[in-house]
Image (tube, rainbow, N blue to C red):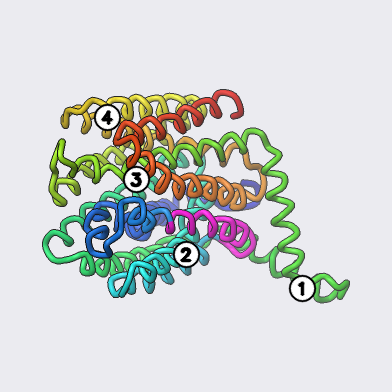
Amino acid sequence: MSGTTSLSSHPEQQGIRIGALVALFLGPAFVFANMYTTQAILPVLSRAFKVDAPTAGLTISVIVLAVAIGSLFYGPLSDRIGRKIVMVGSSLLITLPTLLCAFAPNFTILLCLRALQGLLMPGLTSVAISYVNDEFRGRERGLAMGVYVSGQTLGGLFARLGSAALTAALNWQVALFSFSLPTLIASLAMWRFLPDSQSQVAGRARFLSGSQRATIVGDGDQPGTNVLRQSLSDIWQHLHNRHLVGAFIIGFTLFFGFVGTFTYLPYYLSGPHFGLSTVQLGLVYLLWLTGLCSPIAGSLAERVGSRRAIAVSMSVAGGGLLVTLIPLLPLVIVGLGLLALGMFCTIPAVNLYLGEQAHKAKGTAASLYLSCYYFGGSLGAVLPGVALVHGGWPGVALLCLGTMLIAIASDLLLC
């Protein structure tokens, strides 16, 4: 990174880098957790609001769709005004709808609040990828990306276990309300520990100087018009980069399969064949601890190549999904563990690949990727529900497996 100072550039910045790693873990762990607070308690919400399984699944698909839409905005914004201010500001704002979800008087209001959470969340999720790619180098970059993904992983686990346990002990309202405090803590941790990098300061300076020039020249173009034109130009260039398009397809299909599997898993495991309770369903999500392998996976991807790492990890995930078709609980658990492991090893590899292929406007490239990623997840929260109604668990598993095969093909043919 010419002319800038990364967190790994100088020995005297080691303490700052450690603080940044802590913040990169806590941010997604607590903020990203809000996406999945309803997933483990969907059967409870179905009964509370008297809605069927696909309708209850909208509490996941709505927030994922909102994240997909919001992701298009925050990346270009962070390219112009800096990463940290966007990450911290949006995370702080998420606290309000998170708190209000507990007081939703009906299902429609709950969906609206979930959508608001989703519109704010990509201020962290889309910008943090660019932050890591900008501020870390070499193997440290892979480690930092893995730490970030581990935070997301444990945030998802925290959400599922926490909401399931609190719902079983008290009720779903207390469960949703309880996530507002961790969200606030994460926001303050990022504000305290994430430094303003030199690249961010330079980006803000360029943005302000560009605005001043437009004002002085007085040529009829407003500063906002210039920013919009540049953002659209960046998006156009990224969409004509075959390698980046391949990564976008991988993101879409990967998250479709993952969200589809784990969203409708409670209906499968709580059904007559297995009969697991709400608390037991929450314990199944301990499989997300496989996400602790993400820092190792990120380092390995940096060493062996991100494309090779994507192909191997996606194959592991697909194989695990096939194993879940065997109706024996221990084998289903093993299959889900392989699926989770493959997923959490794929994410840091794809994130690193984005940094390698996007040579400019990296925030915009990350936003496009995450929009595709979450659009896939929003469909994955709905379409497998239809497959569940008509084909049972085999319908869900085979549909999600098909999308994972598309991801592997994209890695081989486009990336």
Which numbered disc, 1 or 3, marks the residue that appears first in the sequence? Answer: 3
Q: Is residue 47 left or right of residue 117?
A: left
Q: Which amino acid does label 2 sit on?
A: Leu
Circle 4: residue type: Thr
Which of the labelled discs sits on residue 139, or is there none?
Answer: none
Which numbered circle lies on residue 150?
A: 3
Q: Which amino acid does label 3 sit on?
A: Ser
User: Magenta includes 72?
Assistant: yes
Q: Distance between the residues labelled 1 and 4?
A: 59 Å
Can residue 209 be seen here? The reply is no
- Mark 2–mark 3 distance (CA, rounded to whole Å): 21 Å
Question: In the rendered structure, which disc, 2 or 3, sits on the residue that comes first in sequence?
Answer: 2
| Residue to which mark 4 is pinned | 324
* Front tag of 2 and 3: 2
Q: Position of residue 207 (x, y in %)?
A: 69, 65
Marks 3 and 4, how far apart at CA: 24 Å
Using residue 157 as the reference point, say whether residue 77 is left or right of it: right
Residue 120: assigned label: 2
> Which of the labelled discs sits on residue 212, or is there none?
1
